Image (tube, rainbow, N blue to C red):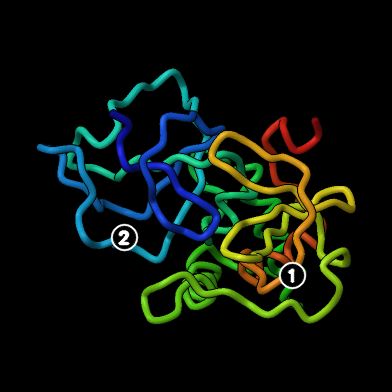
């Protein structure tokens, strides 16, 4: 039976057997004895997205009293949920994200803690996932942004809307856009040049 450690665009953590392209964490939110989640869903404002392969190290997920291993279909999913690239294992990508994030905010530079404060306010509302209004045409949104309609998540990519599922994307037109899932400051980073790694199905 799969562990409850797969993150969806809306930020919820679900159990699903499909594998993702990235891992990451929000602190320690599991019981290693049972390998199940606790009631809390984060213990830190630093929600990060990490590489699956780091210097050949291997971990048994949720088996240690250490950070809780979470998994994402791709980086766009992680960003939608409010995670940012990790400065430890993905330093080059984290620096590129930081520079684009600062540019999008009209700043010369930004630190990881500064980004985390802003992102924490953008991703949560009353301890639940915060959605944001779409002020312009959805096709004006940068590639990698995720929007919500009828409770489902769609990726904006190449002038199309792609329906998200735990195994990948498929083309499907959304009838009515309700909100933006990806936090606004991350959307600004995407508009300022950051290019997230997408699941191969996005370009299939």
Q: Which mark is residue 41?
A: 2
Of the two numbered discs 1 and 2 on the same chain, state the one appearing first in sequence: 2
Q: Indicate the quadrant where residue 169 lies.
A: top right
State which quarter of the image contains the C terminus: top right
Residue 138, horizontal then vertical, whole percent = 82, 67
Element type at mark 1: loop
Establish if 141 lies above or below 156.
Answer: below
165 or 29: which is nearer to us? 165
Residue corresponding to mark 1: 176
Residue at 68% from the left image edge and 63% from the top image edge: 147
How many marks the image carries: the answer is 2
Element type at mark 2: loop
Q: Indicate the quadrant where residue 167 lies.
A: top right
Residue 78, horizontal then vertical, whole percent = 55, 50
Establish if 75 lies above or below 146.
Answer: above
Q: Indicate the quadrant where residue 74 lies.
A: top right
State which quarter of the image contains the N terminus: top left
Label 1 to label 2: alpha-carbon separation: 30 Å
């Amino acid at each position: 039976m799969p562990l409850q450690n797969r993150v969806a665009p809306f930020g919820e953590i679900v159990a699903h057997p499909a594998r993702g392209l990235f891992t990451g964490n929000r602190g320690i939110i599991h019981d290693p004895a049972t390998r199940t989640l606790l009631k809390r869903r984060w213990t830190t404002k630093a929600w990060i997205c990490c590489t699956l392969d780091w210097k050949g190290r291997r971990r048994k997920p949720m088996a240690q009293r250490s950070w809780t291993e979470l998994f994402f279909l791709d980086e766009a999913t992680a960003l939608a949920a409010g995670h940012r690239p990790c400065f430890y294992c993905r330093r080059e990508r984290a620096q590129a994200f930081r520079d684009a994030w600062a540019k999008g905010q009209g700043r010369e530079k930004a630190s990881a803690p500064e980004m985390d404060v802003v992102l924490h306010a953008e991703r949560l509302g009353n301890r639940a996932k915060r959605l944001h209004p779409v002020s312009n045409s959805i096709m004006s949104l940068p590639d990698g942004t995720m929007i919500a309609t009828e409770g489902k998540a769609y990726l904006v990519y190449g002038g199309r809307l792609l329906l998200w599922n735990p195994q990948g994307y498929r083309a499907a037109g959304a009838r009515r856009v309700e909100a933006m899932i990806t936090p606004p400051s991350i959307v600004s980073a995407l508009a300022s040049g950051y290019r997230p790694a997408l699941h191969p199905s996005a370009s299939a």
